[in-house]
Image (cartoon, helix red, strand yellow):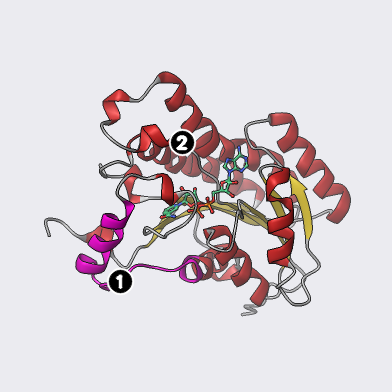
Amino acid sequence: MNFSLEGRTYVVMGVANKRSIAWGIARSLHEAGARLIFTYANERFEKPVKDLVSELEGQDALFYECDVTDDDAVNKTFEEIKGDVGTIHGLAHCIAFANKDDLKGEFVDTSRDGYLLAHNISAYSLVAVARAAQPLMTEGGGIVTLTYLGGERVVQNYNVMGVAKASLDASMKYLANDLGKHGVRVNAISAGPIRTLSAKGIGDFNSVLKKIEETSPLRRTVTQEEVGDTAYYLLSDLSRGVTGEIIHVDSGYNILGLS
Ligand code: NAD
């Protein structure tokens, strides 16, 4: 079995800074020999992302601006990628957003606009991106998205983002069923809490990290690198029989009952 990703091209969506989970995924794919394509939400991220990527020795990366709330932007991005590289072998979707006010207090207070915003950016975007990317995966491929336990269970303060993650999880499974006949696998990684820009918006995030350190089977939080290596597995032939799956990279926290 060849574990190398040399000769393969992957799109990584959602690097904001060096703490981003997407950056952990990019580094794992780079180390495995992949060529990388980065998309970022708007021009504000262009320089920081390009500066970070310049640290990846020998990486001949491409960059595109892509706001996933805009169907035209999503379609244009993948048309441009098709023109520039032809075939891609996979994609990492590492994108989510909700209003800060909706990530504290009670879920019952979520506004209609806040609910729709979170679902638009954090769940529907996977559908739009998968539809646009699949035709470029002419040799088959893999799509990985990032989810959280708050989509399966009630997690304090996670609120509307938990409901959006439940929608993302179900979307991932329906997409896996649709795209499997094209040789495209679709999976999710349920990452344990990691201190990132997005995580900063979640109320009392420090207590969540502490809880994982105190009670998870591994008694520690997880790193971007650990999530990155699982994404590498899911985007490589090592996982060729796996689709529609959620893999928890969370120090085992999800197996606990009362603790
Ligand atoms: P992050 O802030 O580094 O990444 C979120 C990315 O989403 C950013 O790059 C941001 O620019 C992008 N984004 C937001 N709106 C967008 C739009 N309209 N168009 C395009 N891109 C847009 O934070 P992260 O924690 O690395 O988040 C990545 C993914 O991991 C998210 O789906 C998040 O829910 C998930 N996740 C995070 C944790 C955690 O604890 N950090 C745990 C489980 C899952």
Question: Which residue is more in the foreground, 176 or 190?
Answer: 190
Q: Is residue 21 magenta?
A: no
Looking at the picture, which amino acid does disc 1 mark? Answer: Arg
Query: Residue at left 69%, top 57%?
Result: 48
Image side of residue 81 versus residue 133, left or right: right
Measured as percent of width and height from the top left, residue 161 is found at 40, 38
Mark 2 lies on residue: 98
- Which image quarter holds the C terminus? bottom left
Measured as percent of width and height from the top left, residue 248 is found at 37, 60
Query: Residue at left 30%, top 60%?
Result: 209
Sequence-first disc among 1 and 2: 2
Q: Provide the residue span drawn in magenta.
A: 205-227
| Residue 56: image tag | none
Mark 1 lies on residue: 220
- Which image quarter holds the N terminus? bottom right
Check disc 1 and report its element: helix, strand or loop.
loop
